[in-house]
Amino acid sequence: MKNIIPLETLNSHRVYPHPNLPPAWGKGQGGWIKLSIAQFILSLLALALVGAGSFYLGKQQTAPEASASKAQTERKILYYRNPMGLPDTSPVPKKDSMGMDYVAVYEGEDTGSGSVAISPEKVQLLGVRTEAVQRRALTRNVRATGLLEVDERKQQWIAPRFEGWVQQLQVNATGQRVTRGQPLLTVYSPELESAAREVQLAHESGLAEVEKSARSRLDNWQIAPQDLEHLQHGMVHLVLRSPIDGVVIEKMAVAGARFAPGEVLFKLADLSSLWLQAEVAEQDQGALHLGQTVDVKVDAYAQEKFSGKVSFIAPVLNEKTRTVRVRVELPNKEARLRPGMYASVVIAETMPPALTIPLSAVIDSGTQQVAIVQVAEGRFQPRAVQLGARGEDLAVVLNGLQEGETVVISANFLIDAESNLKAALGGFGHAHGGGAPQGTAKEAAPPAAEHAGHEQGAKPTAVGHQAQGVLKAINADGTVSIAHEPIKTLGWPGMTMDFALANSSLVTGIPAGSAIRFELVERKPDEWVITKLQAQPQHEGH
């Protein structure tokens, strides 16, 4: 018979161990319950599992908070931006001219400065290539066109100084090549014959003065000594010879024709060197100097370059063409170049080293030049630049970039288009009072200010920034001094600054010391102008 304890003698809410009970007995609300060993073990396991589950759930609830905190502290700093919103960034911490610390920009942050983030995959897909801004010598090429001509110093005319007749032509074709001393033609002259006889007779008679006078006349006619000797022996025919190595460029002599003193019978030219007469534009004449080496191309040998030197720069400008004539001497030993050919000339000008970027990095709208700057890995920002002289591949940077910054030289139009779209959408949201994220101009600006901005015809791309402050003074130069509160949309802290006014009537009737509400826009890079200003009622406060 089983041992049974009356129920009324036991507490209904607890299980009391009893020394006389077997270890597998327990008590329920209705009395003692017989428990098997297996049931007892399962009960203990269940209690253990419930405890472990509670611990796990508690740990899981705190894990996201810890992970978020860790991620917050381990965010990667991309770069540091100007605290006043100016287009200037730095890869390391620094201060601006007023001693303010540059603001750190973390990975994944939207700075609102017109920059655009592009993933590494997209950068590779677009074919983005970059190059550092650096100092280097710039070579500028000046191009001009011209005409090849005969070197005027190497021309020779055959024009006898006596009267006579052409008896025979040894050279009878234009373009024929001749050498120095080669016979050109044979002539007969009664005057020449008379002077030669006079020399002979005076010599035989011993009349020295008469002989000297006759010889002087023959010398003035440029009769060579060997020819005079032939004349003295009764040869009345004179052979005229070529004085140079060259080419017959004109032939006027005709066999049997009579010629007068000084009449040109042949025109000869030495073509071993030619002149290129080029016309250089007025604005490029600063690149010219004597002795400068230039490259010349002609259509006949399109794949070849000929080298020459500048030997003359005209002192007078052509008023009709606004060009200056430049003479280039070209060697022509092989006689491949010919007078009358058109030619193009490239004059290289090397300038002192200066800060430069590739021309492919410049996006030129005609009124403004922009370069895409890589401010961090995968983040790009359009930057207005001022350019100076331009070369074949490079341009001098006068303002807007610093040495060591990286600019995009390939696919920059695609990045600029994406950045402009982003800026346009942002400006659209501000101008129309919609789509602005929390903490932007829409939140800070009162509704009245937004509607007033519409009445003034604000353009979507000219983003107006709303602010409040105190009008400190109206300056003599037309600007105003304002102590403004922090401007969230620009990331500016509160400070006192001078601003230009779009219209001087904006401050009419508003005394210094008045609390004001105003709107400012960036008219040009780094130039902030107040487009709207009104006194703030005293009950609104700041």
Image (spheres, rainbow, N blue to C red):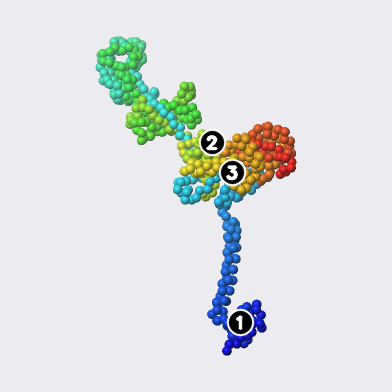
Residue under label 1, please give it. Answer: 32
Q: Residue at x 47, y 22 (%)?
A: 320
Q: Residues within 10 Å of mark 1 (few under 14, many from 20)?
A: some
The quarter holding residue 534 reads top right
Q: Residue at x 35, y 14 (%)?
A: 262
SS at circle 1: strand
Q: Nearer the viewer, mark 1 or mark 2?
A: 1
Counting residues from the start of the chain, the first of labels 1 and 2 encountered is 1
SS at circle 3: loop
Per the rendering, the mark at residue 368 is 2
Mark 1 and mark 2: span between their CA atoms?
96 Å
Q: Please state the horizontal and vertical placement of residue 417, each as a whole percent of the image.
A: 50, 41
Mark 1 and mark 3: span between their CA atoms?
74 Å
* Along the viewing direction, whichever of 245 and 448 lies nearer the viewer: 448
Give the number of callouts.
3
Height in image: 42 above or below 57? below
Asked if labels 2 and 1 touch by Cβ distance under 8 angstroms, the answer is no
Q: Residue at x 41, y 31 (%)?
A: 345
**Amino acid on which the number 1 mark rests in the picture:** Trp
Q: Please state the horizontal and vertical placement of residue 172, each as a whole percent of the image.
A: 27, 20
Mark 3 and mark 2: span between their CA atoms?
30 Å
